[in-house]
Amino acid sequence: MTQSSDLGPEDRKIITLARSARARNGVPEGAAVRDETGRTYVAGTVALDSLKLSALRTAVAMAVASGATSLEAAAVVSDADAASDEDRAAVRDLGGAATLVLLAGPDGELKAAVTAG
């Protein structure tokens, strides 16, 4: 597993953005993705009666809706021990199987670094 200190500044940035979204919105998860141009998209969990999306799937949807054609990396901040298969599939659909998916705890410490594949 990659240590937080081994991450580059852009990867640390998306973890920080995801952590901020979680805290600011008081939601179970925060996420951020970075597209092929370096733009970032930040989201929290969506929990409406008619629509339920994880933070990572919401961030991917925001990237797609904004015209992103690929992803370089994704980060989710959660109490979970792993990124869900559905979350990794959303990242894979836009970024490909080799796209980095970072999972950090609420404290920002990296728990896992895997690929979307």
Image (cartoon, rainbow, N blue to C red):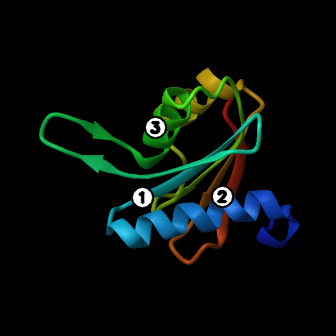
The residue shown at (55%, 35%) is: 63
The answer to whether residue 66 is left or right of residue 43 is right
Instruction: List x then y, in percent, for residue 89.
Output: 55, 27
How crowded is the residue under tag 1: few (<14 C-alpha within 10 Å), some, or many (20+)?
A: many
The CA distance from mark 2 to mark 1 is: 13 Å
Instruction: List x then y, in percent, for residue 54.
Output: 39, 44
Residues tagged 2 and 3 counted as in contact (Cβ below 8 A): no
The answer to whether residue 85 is left or right of residue 55 is right
Determine the secondary structure under disc 3: helix
Task: Name the front one of labels 2 and 1.
Answer: 2
Q: Nearer the viewer, residue 23 or 110?
A: 23
Determine the secondary structure under disc 1: loop
Q: Is residue 39 above or below residue 27?
A: above
The residue shown at (46%, 63%) is: 21
Residue at the spot of label 3:
57
Q: Which label sits on residue 68? A: none
Residue at the spot of label 1:
29
Going from N to C along the chain, the mark reached first, 2 or 1, is: 2
Q: Residue furthest left?
A: 49
Going from N to C along the chain, the mark reached first, 1 or 3, is: 1
Residue 23, quarter of the rendered image: bottom left
The answer to whether residue 27 is left or right of residue 40 is left
The residue shown at (63%, 28%) is: 68
Residue at the spot of label 2:
14
Question: Which part of the image, by quadrant, shows the C terminus?
Answer: top right
Amino acid carrying label 2: it is Ile
Q: Is residue 30 above or below residue 48?
A: below
